Image: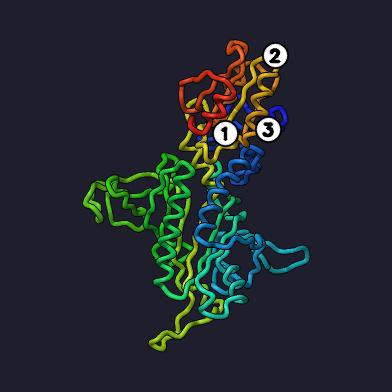
Amino acid sequence: MRQSSLFTKIARTAPSDAVSANAALLERGGFVYKNSAGVYSYLPLGLRVIRKITDIIREEMDALGSNEMLMPALIDRKHLDATGRWDVPVGYRVRGIGDTNDAFTLGWTHEEVITEIVSHHLSSYRDLPFSAYQVQTKFRNEPRAKSGVLRGKEFIMKDMYSFHVSQEDFEAFYEKAKAAYARVFTRCGLDAYCVKAAGGAFTGNTTHEFQVVSSVGEDSIYVCAECRYAENKEITKLKAGDACPQCRGVVEEKTAIEVGNIFPLGTKYSDAFNLIKFTLASGKKQSVVMGSYGIGISRLMGTIAEIHNDAAGLVWPASVAPFTVHLLNLTKSGTAAQEAYEALQKKAVAVLWDDREASAGEKLASADVLGIPLRVVVSEKTAGKIEIKKRDSKETIVGTVTDLMSKVKNIL
């Protein structure tokens, strides 16, 4: 893509009301636009990051054998009435023109919706187990929308639901999902702890959250640096300095951002929607056992921005960066830059070409703000060669376009 074709611009300074790093960096770089508190538009560069994150998540969910689907954002009251969650003060009520009663809510969760759908397709224990997931916009009546895209009223989420014939089968899948989540966060460049936590409005069972240590996080977790055992402060009896119950290492208190969670749902929803029951060898009837698994995709982007930055701007991990190469033309003709651009495109390398009429200083500063992993500079002083520099390194390599093509993956 030519940078001159982007309608978005890089601001000289961060917005005055941006109190968190992700808000300042993402808004300044033109990745997102703040429409109102907790409501953001994802601009072309930001949407490319969202898509890269989503691709990673889809690969891991598909590897679990999960089916992708899409459920409505507008949820009928009857679904939440079935489980007594209509009056949970989380969502937004919606009524149509002429209606006298609230009939719908904007989707803040989809356990009821998926279970009602499944009730029309599940006819035998032979249909189990299976899982389904979606990437969908969620809405939460968040009174404390803050910290950029970390806490919003509207956000992008991946939620998955699994259905099992037994608790044992559920637990086996739960562990596989836990491992898949760990891979997602690692691939996104984050070090996430798997933390024991409470279930909130979703389940009364003990659940697990995935937390990334950060000073802007709103959760307090107690972690063992030796074995990585962790518990949320809301449920723990641990204190800083205690011995870890797993390995006897020293427990520390950390502030963290929640980027994902997994919930054992038991039979609450399957019973509410009358999913089929199975007769066990003992003669006892067994309900379908369920699980729920969520990742906040837009929050994940904000978390990456919080962790991967420096004084000059963003430093995107290559796996989620909007482009792999940022090509800067500092010559008058642009011929050499054009050749480099075409060569990179032929090799399917995602490249943003800064072809704007701007000073060398402005282009170099802009590249730092955007944080694309590789900066390639074409200038008069390189005499037919190019300068290659990683965003997170001070070392510059001088070589030919052929050198770049052969080294681009190794450099990253």
Q: Amino acid at mark 2?
A: Lys
Secondary structure under the numbered disc 2 in the rendered image: loop
Q: Quadrant of residue 49?
A: top right
Q: Amino acid at mark 1?
A: Thr
Q: Quadrant of residue 378?
A: top right
Q: Earlier in the sequence, mark 3 or mark 1?
A: 3
Front-most of residues 92 and 169: 169
Marks 3/1: CA distance? Answer: 12 Å
Quick check: can you spot residue 17?
Answer: no
**Residue placed under numbered mark 3 in the picture:** 1
What residue lies at 53% left-to-right and 23% top-to-bottom? 388
Considering only vertical position in the picture, is 349 above or below 383?
A: below
**Residue placed under numbered mark 1 in the picture:** 324
**Residue placed under numbered mark 2 in the picture:** 332
Front-most of residues 82 and 211: 211
Residue 332 x, y percent position in the rendering? 70, 13
Secondary structure under the numbered disc 3 in the rendered image: loop
- In this picture the colour scheme is rainbow
